[in-house]
Image (cartoon, rainbow, N blue to C red):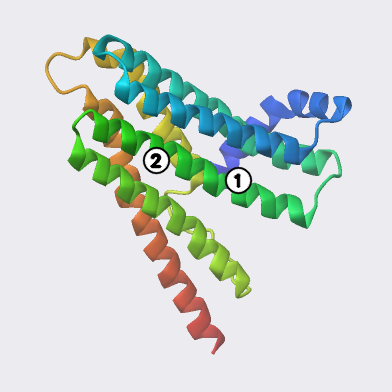
C-alpha cells in the first residue's frame, strides 16, 4: 500500500460517521459535488476581492479563501464515499464529479492569478497560470487515456496534492504573511503554486509517456 492509499483509508475512517449521517438524511452525491463546486467559486471570489482589499485586509481574505478550498476538498471524498456506502453509484455521477472538479480548479487558480496580477506580481501570476494549465492537463491526459481503455494514474501531482498545496499556501499566507519581515510574504503563497506548475506539467508528460509505452506494448 502506497502513501496515498494509506492516507485515503485513514481519512475514510475519520469521515465515515459523517458520510453515514449524510446518507441517513438523504443527501445525494451529486448535491455534495455541487456544494464543493460552489465553495470553490466562493474561494475564487475571496481571492479576487483580496486583490482589491486594503493591504492590512488582503491577508485575511486570501487566508479565508485557502481555508474554503481546503474545506471544499473534503467534499471530493464525501461524494464518492456517499455514493459507494449509500449504493448510489452512477455513471452520470462519476462524470458530473469529474466535470465539477475541473471547474473547481479553474475557478480557484483563476482567482489566485487575478489576485497576483492585481497586486503587481505579474511573473507569479503567469507561474500560477502555468499551474492551472498543468492541473487541467493532468486530468485531461488521464481522461483521454481511459477513453482508449488505458489505466493512467501515475505521477506525483494528482488532485489531492494540488488541493493541499494550493489551500495550505493560501492559508499560511493569510496567517503568517503579515509577520514576515526578512522576505517577501508572497513567497508563502506562490512557492506551493510554483511546485504545482512544475510537477503537474511533469506529471502530465509522465502520463503521456506511460500511455505511449502501453500502446506500444499492445501493438
Marking on residue 27: none
> Of the numbered discs in the image, which one, if any, rests on residue 100?
1
Left or right of 215 in this view: 131 = left
Most extreme residue toward the left, as rendered?
Answer: 182
- Compared to residue 171, the image places residue 7 above or below, namely below
**Residue 176 appears left or right of 34:** left
- Is residue 173 depicted above or below 192 in this figure? above
Give residue 144's quadrant in the image: bottom right
Q: Residue 66's quadrant in the figure?
A: top left
Front-most of residues 81 and 111: 111
In the image, what residue occupies the spot 45% across and 31% down?
44
Residue 77 position (above or below residue 54) = below
Marks 2/1 in contact by CB < 8 Å: the verdict is no
User: x, y (%) of residue 25?
Assistant: 86, 25
On-image quarter of the C terminus: bottom right
Label ID, residue 110: 2
In the image, 163 versus 92, the foreground residue is 92
Question: Which circle's residue, 2 or 1, is located before the other in the chain?
Answer: 1
Q: Is residue 42 visible?
A: yes
Q: Residues within 10 Å of mark 2 (few under 14, many from 20)?
A: many
User: Where is residue 147 shown, x and y percent of the image?
Assistant: 61, 71
- Tag 1 secondary structure: helix
* Residue 161 visible, this angle: no
Q: Give residue 134's position: percent from left, percent from top.
A: 38, 54
Helix, strand or loop at mark 2: helix
Q: Residue at x 61, y 38 (%)?
A: 8
Residue 191, given in percent of the width and then of the height, sits at 26, 35
Instruction: Please give the name of the residue rendered at 34% of the width and 51% of the height, measured from the top-left corner.
Output: 199
Between the residue at mark 2 and the residue at mark 1, the CA separation in whole angstroms equals: 15 Å
Q: Residue at x 41, y 71 (%)?
A: 209
Label 1: few (<14), some or many (≥20) within 10 Å?
many
In the image, is 211 to the left or to the right of 206?
right
Amino acid at each position: 500500500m502506497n502513501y496515498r492509499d494509506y492516507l485515503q483509508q485513514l481519512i475514510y475512517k475519520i469521515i465515515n460517521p459523517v458520510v453515514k449521517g449524510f446518507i441517513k438524511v438523504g443527501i445525494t452525491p451529486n448535491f455534495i459535488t455541487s456544494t464543493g463546486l460552489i465553495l470553490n467559486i466562493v474561494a475564487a471570489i475571496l481571492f479576487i476581492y483580496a486583490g482589491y482589499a486594503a493591504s492590512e485586509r488582503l491577508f485575511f481574505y486570501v487566508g479565508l479563501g485557502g481555508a474554503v478550498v481546503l474545506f471544499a476538498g473534503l467534499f471530493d471524498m464525501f461524494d464518492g464515499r456517499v455514493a459507494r456506502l449509500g449504493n448510489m453509484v452512477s455513471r452520470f455521477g462519476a462524470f458530473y464529479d469529474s466535470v465539477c472538479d475541473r471547474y473547481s480548479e479553474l475557478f480557484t487558480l483563476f482567482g489566485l492569478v487575478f489576485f497576483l496580477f492585481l497586486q503587481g506580481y505579474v511573473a507569479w501570476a503567469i507561474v500560477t497560470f502555468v499551474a492551472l494549465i498543468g492541473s487541467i492537463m493532468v486530468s485531461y491526459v488521464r481522461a483521454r487515456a481511459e477513453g482508449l481503455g488505458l489505466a493512467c494514474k501515475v505521477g506525483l501531482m494528482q488532485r489531492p496534492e494540488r488541493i493541499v498545496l494550493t489551500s495550505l499556501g493560501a492559508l499560511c499566507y493569510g496567517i503568517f504573511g503579515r509577520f514576515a519581515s526578512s522576505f517577501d510574504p508572497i513567497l508563502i503563497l506562490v512557492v506551493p503554486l510554483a511546485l504545482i506548475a512544475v510537477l503537474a506539467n511533469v506529471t502530465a508528460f509522465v502520463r503521456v509517456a506511460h500511455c505511449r509505452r502501453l500502446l506500444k506494448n499492445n501493438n
